[in-house]
Image (cartoon, rainbow, N blue to C red):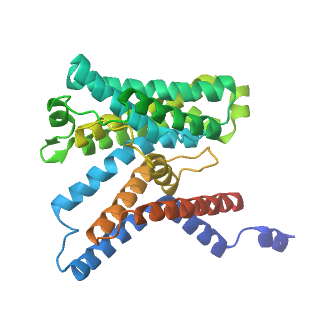
Amino acid sequence: MESKIEAALPSAAYEQRLRWARFVARYGIVFVLLLIVVILSILTPIIRGEQLFLTPRNLLQVGLQASINAIIAVGMTFVITSGGIDLSVGSMVALAGVLAAMAMKELQIGAFGGFVVAVGVGALCGLFNGFLITRIGLSPFIATLGTMGVFRGIGLVVSQGQSIYGFGREFSQIFAGAVIGIPVPVIVAAIVALLFWFVLNHTRFGKYTIAIGGSEEITRLAGVPVKNYKMGIYALCGVLTGAAAALLLARLSSGDPTFGRFFELDAIAAAVMGGTSLSGGEGTITGTIVGALIISLVQNAMNLFNVPSYWQDIIVGSVIVAAVILDQLRKRQSRVA
């Protein structure tokens, strides 16, 4: 009898493999980031004849490129963790940037007023998405696919398809400047990451976000106002997208209704690559930031190696496919565990 019980228990080798699988699932993305850094450090001098990658200027550029996507991806992490998706964030960036630029130019509301407008537009867009999903009953995919066209269309109409310039230098000086040599967008992205890491892991809002993604029905039966929380989650995504739009507006010094194309793909890729499950119920802010850095490193490498820009779409698309495959493998491993 005792031998049968011992045979039914997991072997030491199996437990070791299980611990290793959990370790890779949790920290594997960090090792991927470090591996990319090492590879680029070796290849850049060989291909370009000098070390263009490991320079303070280039590394700051990598951080600057990653910051916009990272801020949006943090909001996307909450949405995906709750079991949803938001395909409209790229169009939100365009609309928020255009309206903020127009408000500063026409109404003379100043730099901080422009930032508030961008964030406010993002919040309203997020609330509208949440309304369509929770009150009208549309699926997140259909709702945000529709608003992706609506938001960009509004931006094109109000701007008459033209870029908006002439809203003053103060906005760019403040939100595209640097503090002790660190670009403001990088500082904002770091603050956002730390703040919402805490929110997701140590607040009721974060715990309910995870619970809703795990099982919306069980969470509702437990007395949680699921619809209200989902509205808040989409509004949060909109707020962060609006903030990213303001930083992009400051960096480019123009509001353009064509900005933000494929930003939703970058944000989804960063979140899922970092360990957020597309089926909901599992999310990680740390992984999302690492995912955003990996995407930025890939784009930076392509620029350093003079690879045509249209290859970046292929790379990001491939990253999303790979991330989804890894997500499926993680879920299978968790079921085995």
Q: Considering only vertical position in the picture, is 147 above or below 225?
A: below
Q: Considering only vertical position in the picture, is 118 above or below 44?
A: above
Where residue 332 appears, as percent x and y from the top left, is 68, 61
Q: Residue at x 19, y 36 (%)?
A: 172
Left or right of residue 73: residue 163: left
Left or right of residue 160: residue 200: right
Where residue 173 appears, as percent x and y from the top left, is 15, 36
Q: Decide if residue 6 is in sight here.
A: yes
Extreme residue toward the left, this view? 180
Where residue 33 appears, as percent x and y from the top left, is 38, 64
Where residue 89 appears, as percent x and y from the top left, is 47, 39
Left or right of residue 129: residue 215: right
- Quarter-wise, where is residue 104 in the image? top left
Q: Residue at x 48, y 33 (%)?
A: 153
Q: Quadrant of the N terminus?
A: bottom right
Q: Residue at x 21, y 26 (%)?
A: 111
Q: Residue at x 43, y 56 (%)?
A: 291
- Quarter-wise, where is residue 336 in the image? bottom right
Extreme residue toward the front, this view? 160
